[in-house]
Every structure is written in C-alpha cells, then in structure tokens.
Image (cartoon, rainbow, N blue to C red):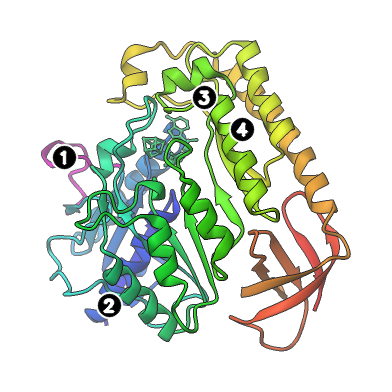
C-alpha cells in the first residue's frame, strides 16, 4: 500500500483541510505514516501569516530537497497560504516540489470527489469550513491574497456534512471561516450565521456547536441572541480586536473603534452571562507609540479575556501595510511589548481560572495524553482528569481541584 504524510502548520482551517485531504488519500488507497522518509506522497500544508511561520515552511522545504534528491520517485506537493497565483515562479523557486495547489482546493492530479471526503473515524471534536476566503483586506494581512474572496457553502451542504460526521462519531462541530459573521451574503437567499446555527442545532446526536472567527464590525445582535437561545451553541466567542488604539485600528483598516468594540463585548456579556471571550492582538504595528501600546494593555486589563493570542507585527509582502508603512518598531521593542502583554494576560487568566476551583464543569472528552483524559468545557477551558475507564467522546462532569492560567485539573 502506498503511504502518505501530511505536515501542517497554521490556523484551524489548514488543520481541517489537511484532515479532508487525508480522508481523500485513504479513499484512494493510501495509508498514513508519520515518518516522512517512509512516505510515497508528502504534502506540506503551509502558513505565511507571519515571517516566523513562513520560515518554518521554507526550512521544511529545504529539508525535503535532499529527500527528493535521494528518492526522486516520491511525490512532493505544497498547499496552504504559501501558494499564490504565480505557480511558474513557485516551480522555479522550489523545483523539487512536484505540485502546488491552493488552500482549500483538491490537488488537480487527484480525481475530485463528488462530495467532500470525510474521516471514517472523526475525532469527537470535528471542524467544518462554512466560508472560504476573506473580503476584508486588513492592511497587515496576507490571507485575502492567498485564500481569495469569500465563498459561503449552502446550508443544506453544511448540514449534510455535519450529520454525516455525527453519524461517524463526532459530538462537537466547530464551524470555520476567516470571518464567520459574513457567512451567507453571497448565497441566493442570503441566510446568515444565526440561520445556519438554528438549523444545525436540530441535528440529533450533535452535542455542541462552536464557530471561529468573528469580526467585530460584522457581529450582529441577531447572532448574539441565537447563541444565547440555542442549546447546543457553546458560550464562547472568538472576537479579534487587534489593538486598543483607535488610530492603530484605523491604519489597520479594521472598521471599528475601541468604543464600539467595548460596547459589543458589553452586549455579548449581558445576553450571555457565562460567555468566554477570546481575542487576537498585534503589537508593534508600524508607528505604534508607547502610549498606543499602553491602550492595548488597558483594554486587556479592563476586558479580561479568557484567552488572548498575541503576535508581534510582521510585514507581509503584497499587503498595504508592507507597502505604505515603514516597519519602524525595532525587533527588541516588539519582543518587549509582546512579553509585557503576555505577562499581563497570564495574570488575568490565573485569576479567571482560579474562580473555577471547586466548581463542577461538563467536559467533552477528546483524548488521552500522558495517562490523563482531557477535554474542554463549553467555554473552551482545557480540563484534565485521571481514570482507568474509557471516556473517549463522552460528556462527563468534573469537579475542579487545581487551576492554572492554561488548564484545569479535577476529578470525575
Ligand atoms: N480572520 C481573523 C484572523 C486571521 S489571521 C481575524 O480577522 O482576526 C490570525 C491572526 O494572525 C490575526 O488575528 C492577527 O492577530 C495575526 N496576524 C495576521 N497578520 C499578521 C501580521 N502581518 N503580523 C502579525 N500578526 C498577524
Ligand atoms: Fe486577515 Fe482581516 Fe481577513 Fe482576518 S478579517 S483574515 S485579519 S484580512
């Protein structure tokens, strides 16, 4: 049996797309291997959202160059956000790569399946892409250039896929898109995310629904009310703010002010009192002053997010920010700001999670790691517990006995 190996970095969409590719390869008679030098077919699913990710991909490509030289019969393919429209140039830069195909596509050298290939034994927590691409063009971001314009999948198609995943064992589904709030605007009846959630909430056997990522400029009251009302939809919202200064948000082209963001979070917390809110932050954006950075810290202190993903600004060739602004915050300064923001957030998470001590929380068990079962609460907190019984894919109640900024531990 021929073997395939997929290497993936980057966002959940990349992970979901790699999973689909893996299923397709298996349908075509390939067997998975985690050893690169045993594989007949190697796919790299790349990310270039920041320079650090791009470096890892380029590094991996250069390692594979010698493997391809030693074994020219292997097939090497590259997908994900490194792949742009100029495949001729990619072929010149990476002559040892046989095929390039765009993120979310099927490689042209494989027969395209009639429907999406789904894993035969999905994890209890599965991912389903509902909208591809992005129309926003935030000034720093490469994603719209690599993933193209927004394309929503029709509700019946998504519902069919979710039903099938549930039939095969999935209990929780996370709906994915760069901006899930603009779901449906390009479909005939213009359904929105709230309509989609209402439809999926009816699916028997499905226990939980989540979705990522929301855009603050597009999140509607109708959606907030749907989250509050629908039983299966988890109390968790991922709402990237990116900066705490109006001027920086303006040059980032985010389309909202800090006051509007605060009001939105206030509304969400009023309608969904137990909600967990997470966000993304960029520090060291061109021209970000010490004072503007302080405003980001102030927003973190005041809002008290459950989790924050913090990144140092990295210019991406082809974006408006890389073209129009000088990358003028020195690298050491960016690192210092990153560290400060992370330390502050660690303190906040320590406090938030400490309040969960002695509480009993429902978790969906995803797997086992170093002798401990783990899973997540509806609010996306990672929880560990010990037991000799098999709890894979089950909902269990755990009494929390120990907390840290990153995870919780308890007893069943
Ligand atoms: N669609 C989502 C996230 C897309 S990219 C959104 O609108 O927020 C994921 C995260 O990477 C972003 O939230 C941002 O914080 C970070 N990011 C994107 N481009 C970046 C860049 N050029 N430098 C540093 N961080 C970046
Ligand atoms: Fe990038 Fe902005 Fe689109 Fe998110 S919304 S993918 S940050 S352009």
Q: Earlier in the sequence, mark 1 or mark 2?
A: 2
Q: Position of residue 353 (x, y in %)?
A: 79, 52
Q: Quadrant of the C terminus?
A: bottom right
Camera-side mark, 1 or 4: 4
Q: Earlier in the sequence, mark 1 or mark 4?
A: 1
Residue at numbered disc 3: 257
Task: Give the residue displayed 45% in from the left and 26% down from the top.
Answer: 314
Task: Give the residue displayed 68% in from the left and 32% down from the top.
Answer: 300
Q: CA distance from mark 2 to mark 4?
A: 50 Å
Q: Quadrant of the N terminus?
A: bottom left
Residue at numbered disc 1: 85
Task: Give the residue displayed 53% in from the left and 31% down from the top.
Answer: 242
Q: Residues within 10 Å of mark 2 (few under 14, many from 20)?
A: some
SS under mark 2:
loop
The circle on residue 30 is: 2
Residue 30, above or below 106? below
Task: Give the residue displayed 54% in from the left and 20% down from the top.
Answer: 284
SS under mark 1:
loop
Q: Residues within 10 Å of mark 3 (few under 14, many from 20)?
A: many
Q: CA distance from mark 3 to mark 4?
A: 9 Å
Q: Position of residue 43 (x, y in %)?
A: 30, 59
Q: Earlier in the sequence, mark 3 or mark 1?
A: 1
Q: Quadrant of residue 330?
A: top right
Query: Where are the magenta residues, as a range?
Result: 82-98
């Amino acid at each position: 049996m021929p073997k395939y190996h997929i290497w993936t970095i980057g966002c959940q969409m990349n992970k979901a797309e790699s999973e689909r590719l893996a299923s397709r390869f298996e349908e075509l008679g390939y067997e998975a291997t985690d050893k690169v030098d045993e594989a007949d077919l190697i796919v790299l699913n790349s990310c270039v959202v920041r320079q650090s990710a791009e470096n890892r991909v380029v590094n991996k490509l250069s390692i594979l160059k010698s493997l391809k030289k030693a074994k020219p019969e292997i097939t090497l393919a590259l997908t994900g956000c490194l792949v742009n429209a100029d495949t001729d140039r990619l072929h010149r830069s990476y002559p040892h790569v046989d095929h390039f195909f765009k993120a979310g596509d099927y490689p042209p050298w494989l027969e395209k399946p009639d429907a999406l290939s789904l894993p035969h034994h999905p994890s209890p927590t599965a991912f389903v892409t509902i909208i591809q691409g992005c129309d926003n063009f935030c000034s720093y971001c490469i994603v719209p250039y690599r993933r193209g314009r927004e394309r929503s999948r029709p509700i019946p198609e998504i519902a069919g896929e979710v039903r099938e995943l549930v039939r095969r064992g999935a209990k929780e589904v996370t709906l994915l898109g760069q901006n899930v709030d603009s779901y449906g605007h390009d479909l005939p009846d213009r359904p929105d995310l709230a309509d989609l959630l209402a439809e999926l909430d009816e699916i028997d056997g499905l226990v939980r629904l989540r979705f990522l990522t929301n855009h603050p400029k597009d999140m509607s009251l109708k959606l907030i009310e749907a989250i509050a009302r629908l039983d299966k939809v988890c109390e968790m919202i991922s709402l990237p703010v990116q900066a705490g200064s109006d001027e920086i948000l303006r040059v980032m082209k985010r389309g909202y002010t800090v006051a509007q963001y605060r009001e939105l979070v206030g509304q969400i917390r009023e309608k969904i009192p137990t909600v967990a809110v997470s966000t993304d932050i960029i520090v060291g954006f061109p021209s970000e002053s010490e004072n503007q950075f302080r405003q980001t810290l102030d927003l973190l202190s005041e809002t008290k997010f459950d989790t924050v993903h913090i990144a140092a600004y990295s210019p991406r060739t082809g974006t408006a920010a890389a073209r129009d602004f000088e990358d003028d915050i020195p690298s050491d300064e960016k690192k210092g700001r990153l560290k400060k923001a992370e330390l502050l957030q660690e303190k906040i998470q320590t406090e938030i999670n400490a309040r969960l001590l002695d509480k009993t929380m429902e978790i969906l068990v995803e797997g086992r790691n170093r002798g401990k079962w783990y899973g997540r609460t509806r609010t996306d907190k990672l929880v560990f517990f010990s037991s000799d019984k098999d709890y894979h894919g089950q909902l269990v109640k755990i009494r929390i006995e120990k907390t840290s900024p990153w995870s919780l531990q308890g007893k069943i």
